[in-house]
Amino acid sequence: MALGFFLATAVVAVAVVSSAPVGIGDGAGVRLEHKQRNLQQDGPASSMFQPDEHGLSVGAHKDQSFAAPEQVHIALARSDSPEEYAVTVAWVTWPNTQSRVAWGSSVDNLGNIADGTSTTYSARHPGRADYTSGFLHSATLQGLEPSSTYFYSCGDDTLEMSSVRSFDTPPKVGPEQPITLGVLGDLGQTDDSAASLAAIDGDNSIDLVLHAGDLSYADCDQPRWDSFMRMLDPVASRLPWMVAAGNHEIETNGAYPGAKPFLAYESRFRMPAVGAPTDLGRGCGAGGGLDGDGYLCGEGWGADEADAAAIEEAERLSSPVGTRGGEGVAAGNTVGAAVRQAARGVRMAFDATGEGSEDEQPPVSCCPSEWSGTYDYGNSFYSFDVGPVHVVALNPYTATGENSVQYSWLQKDLESADRALTPWLVVMMHCPWYNSNLAHQGERQAETAMRAMEPLLHQHKAAVVITGHVHAYERSHPVVDFELAEDGPIHLVVGGAGNREGHAADFYPKPEWSAFRDGTVYGSGRLSIRSSSLALWEWTASTRDTAGLHDVAWVSNPFSPYTPGEEDGDASPLKATGRRSDNGGDSAVSASHERDNHDQEGEDVSRTREKAGLRIHALPERRTRRVARG
């Protein structure tokens, strides 16, 4: 097959290699050895880990001043100038102190001052201890030059300031600005989580991180948010950490009327919000009525009648993976054991192998995979421009239908995005639309969002959709409506960063749209955008015995497709890898090694990544179908 034709379909895959694990020793409770780019780490914000009662690695307090800032992290903010960046610095103190950041372009000159605000929250859940957070501070730094290094210290200059930290701003907004995005989902606080975090931390090319939901796995145990943020601090205090809402951020319980959904998530992070959060208190057990998509808002899934109805409805609408669902459902999902478990109220209680017990899991309604409620604006959904990319973060755990606030916002956001400056459209959300794993099939959250929003993303030529939720890795071919489509986005499921619920190792027979999948290792990804037309996607496993590059794919931007010719110049993907294909021509690159419990149909995996570049080989011809806009 000609290289030009295949790149028009947007994805090319490359061979894989294993290497030594990054920064992790053996056994539980290891110390995570970060490459410290910041000058000094404060006590509880340091990279010190100890196992908790579940054997998980969580941040350990050290002796320090009570007023010392901890849990420091940064995020891109809305800038006052389109030519500059803004960054929000967030941190925690336990007494009520001043919210101030001193910053500048050198460690010896922190003459700029940004004052901010602080808040606290309290949470109470049946079976959990009452909790009140420390003071959650944030302040925004404006007027930051692109591609520049800044130094900062946060805290109260009358009591105690943090050690001096640093961060690099991304390249300026523009179509030909190379940029690299770190990508992961479903992180948690295990030693495997730490290994994935170390891989991100050790990669000097990454400009910012996209975290596709399911962050701390606190699951209503609020002190675990503190341990998670301490674990994150050494990395997230120098790399903008952009998050999306997952079901483990819901943290509500219908039996307790005062439990507000997403409370910790909204309180602890400061994304570039388009407005103040609304309807944060609405959810199951909080007023009833209908949510924004017209579904009954109540405890719903807890009653036996609802269980039976849900199972019956799910089975009625089910169809084989990779085909259209019935009754107008834009699905293609087969109901399996995971769906039946979910319908009985055992949300996220089992991995795909069925291991574990209900007694070992958090309360059923603390982190439901399907949830009726409303949470708009704030950290719920937002967008920002960085380099050549317009990034959109969506939330499937609020209303997503065509009459919803989120859909209306998304429509306006995509229409107003300056694609001449940001030709790449990258979307992040938690629930996958394309998932051939047994886990999380047939969930209403994904089906409702997909039915409404996929045509909109296709119309505006989205290039990459990043999701989590399923604790495995999967990459699709360019796809729209479950058909291969030259101008469709690729979908990435990156929900295997290391959380405590284990692997989702079982898959259905491989559908045509699925390019690569692996449910046996943990890891993270990197999206390196090389030009307005071409990007390189890499997924790296961080599990000790299998650490190394596992999947690589070139991505052609459907908004500005890569069109190779006889004289390609430096942008040629074959030249970028440093090697030609084995047959000496511009052939496509083959699929990588696939660990698949149901089929072993991967091509030759003997090629390795060498210092000179990636060795490549030919891909069998695949059928594609151009899908009209609309």
Image (cartoon, rainbow, N blue to C red):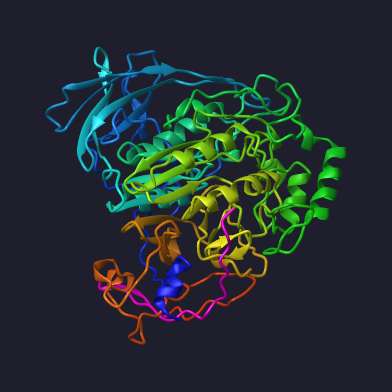
Is residue 322 in view from this perspective?
yes
Q: Residue at x 70, y 41 (%)?
A: 359
Residue 322 locus on image (x, y percent):
67, 64
Tell me the quarter of the picture where residue 229 sits: top left
Is residue 519 in view from this perspective?
no
Tell me the quarter of the picture where residue 286 sits: top right
Q: Main secondary structure of the magenta part?
A: loop
Please say if 594 is above or below 440: below
Residue 206 lies in the magenta stretch = no
Which region shows up in magenta?
A: 606-630
Residue 70 locus on image (x, y percent):
35, 28
Please say if 611 is above or below 35: below
Left or right: 229 with respect to 247?
left
Q: Can you name the residue that lies furthest to the left here?
A: 108
Residue 154 locus on image (x, y percent):
28, 24
Front one among 545 and 506: 506
Front one among 237 and 529: 529
Left or right: 524 with respect to 299?
left
Residue 622 lies in the magenta stretch = yes
Tell me the quarter of the picture where residue 19 sits: bottom left
Please say if 51 is above or below 545: above
Front one among 463 and 476: 463
